[in-house]
Image (cartoon, rainbow, N blue to C red):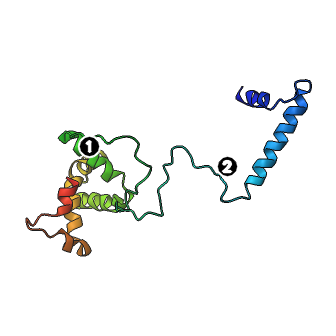
Amino acid sequence: MRLLGHFKSLVGNKAQPEGSIAKGYIVEEALIFCSRYFERIESRLNRPRRVNDEPNLNEASEMSSIFPLQGKPVGSSLTFPLTPLVKTQAHRYVLFNCVAVNPFIDEFRDHIKKSTRGRRPSASDLERKVNKEFPYWFPKRICRRPNVSRTCKSQSNQCPLHNLLM
C-alpha cells in the first residue's frame, strides 16, 4: 500500500495518471543514478542513519579493544547498584562471551581434567566446575603472565585485575 501511495503522489495530470506516474518514476530513478556520483552531497542513499551504532574509528578510544565503544548515548545516564548475584552473573556472561578469553577457558578445562587424578569428570560436572570456578581462577592466571606481572603488582600484593573483574 505504501508504494501505491507513493505512486499516487507522483500524479500531476489527473487526466493521464499512468503517464504522470511513469514520468515521475523515471525522474526519480535518474536523480538516484546521478546522486551516486556525488560524494559530498547528501542524498537518500548516503544519508547517515537516524540511529548510528557504528563505532567511530576516527576517534582514539580510551576503552578496551575488547569492548569497542559503539553508538552514541541518548538521554541522561542512570546508575544503580547491582546485587552480588547480578554482578556475578554479568561477570560470567562477559567472560564466557569474550573471544579473547576462550583460550583461557580451554586451559582451565584442561587444568580440571588433569587435577581429577585418573577419574574423568562428566561433561556436565566439567561445565559446572568451569562456570563456578573459572571467574576466580582467571585473574590469578592473568597475573602470572610475564608481560602482565609488572602491572599486577600492587601494594596489597593482590592483582588489580582481580579487583576490576570482581
Q: Secondary structure at mark 2?
A: loop
Query: Circle 1 is placed at which residue position?
Result: 89
Q: Is residue 38 above or below residue 151?
A: above
Q: Is residue 13 above or below residue 114?
A: above
Rendering coords of residue 163 (x, y %): 17, 57
Q: Residue at 18% across / 41% down in the picture?
A: 84
Q: Is residue 103 left or right of residue 162?
A: right
Q: Secondary structure at mark 1?
A: helix
Q: Nearer the viewer, residue 156 or 69?
A: 69
Q: Which mark is residue 36?
A: none
Badge 2: how crowded within 10 Å, few (<14), some, or many (20+)?
few
Q: Residue at 79% across / 31% down in the picture?
A: 7
Compare marks 1 and 2 and give the one earlier in the sequence.
2
Q: Which mark is residue 45?
A: 2
The three-letter amino acid code for the residue at tag 2 is: Leu
Rendering coords of residue 37 (x, y %): 74, 59
- One can see residue 61 in this view: yes
Point out the image quarter for the N terminus.
Answer: top right
Camera-near label (1 vs 2) is: 2
Name the residue at the left extreme.
156
- One can see residue 116 in this view: no
